[in-house]
Amino acid sequence: MNKIKITLLIVVAILSFSSCAEKSKEETKIKIDKETLNENFDWLLGSWKRNNEEEGKETLEIWKKRSNSEYSGIGFTMQNSDTLKQEKIKLKDVDGKWILEVHPQDEPAPITFNVTSYNEHEFICENKELDFPKLIKYWKNGDKLNALVAGDDLEIAFEFERMTQK
């Protein structure tokens, strides 16, 4: 009887240790994945000029990293030195989920999109409750930055080149 108790104690100890080791591996993997994700959006950083804009207009986006869990951007379109439209943009981690907030200058509050997929070179955001856009996608394309805003029957493609520092 004593041998059975000792054997059971050994088995329980091994299983407990094994379970703790697996949990530790999972926690480490999640931590590493989250750190990698935080670095993934760094490809947005910098000043970008749209190169497929209408004649006479100029669209720019400027992205900065505020912390490992927040990036902020500003996008604006100008014509003859007048700002036609402007929007503030935030990409941030809220309770372990990434969201994109877009705050157009003529709206009282930001519009929120959930990041539905991402990797080290792109992310896709969706808000299916909106008429337009329902989807926003950003991706790195070589040394260019591309974006797409899309709704049911309309897609607008953006291609940006990095602006050189003077």
Image: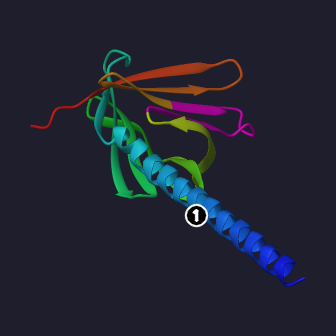
Q: Nearer the viewer, residue 62 or 70?
A: 70
Q: Residue furthest left?
A: 166
Q: Is residue 136 magenta?
A: yes
Of the 4 image quadrants, the one containing the C terminus is top left
Q: Return the x and y of residue 56 as percentages of the image width and height.
A: 31, 19
Q: Is residue 92 magenta?
A: no
Point 44% across, 23% down: residue: 158
Q: Residue furthest right?
A: 1
Q: Nearer the viewer, residue 51 or 114?
A: 114
Q: Quadrant for residue 79, please give it.
A: top left
Does residue 62 appear anywhere in the picture? yes
Asked whether, in this view, residue 160 is left or right of residue 139, the answer is left
Point 45% across, 29% down: residue: 139
Numbered disc total = 1
In the structure shown, which secondary structural element does the residue marked by tag 1 occupy? helix
Of the 4 image quadrants, the one containing the N terminus is bottom right
Q: Which residues are magenta?
A: 121-137
Q: Nearer the viewer, residue 99 or 158?
A: 99
Q: Nearer the viewer, residue 62 or 95?
A: 95
**Where is mark 1, residue-wise?**
24
Q: Amino acid at mark 1?
A: Ser
Does residue 89 appear anywhere in the picture? no
Point 50% across, 53% down: residue: 34
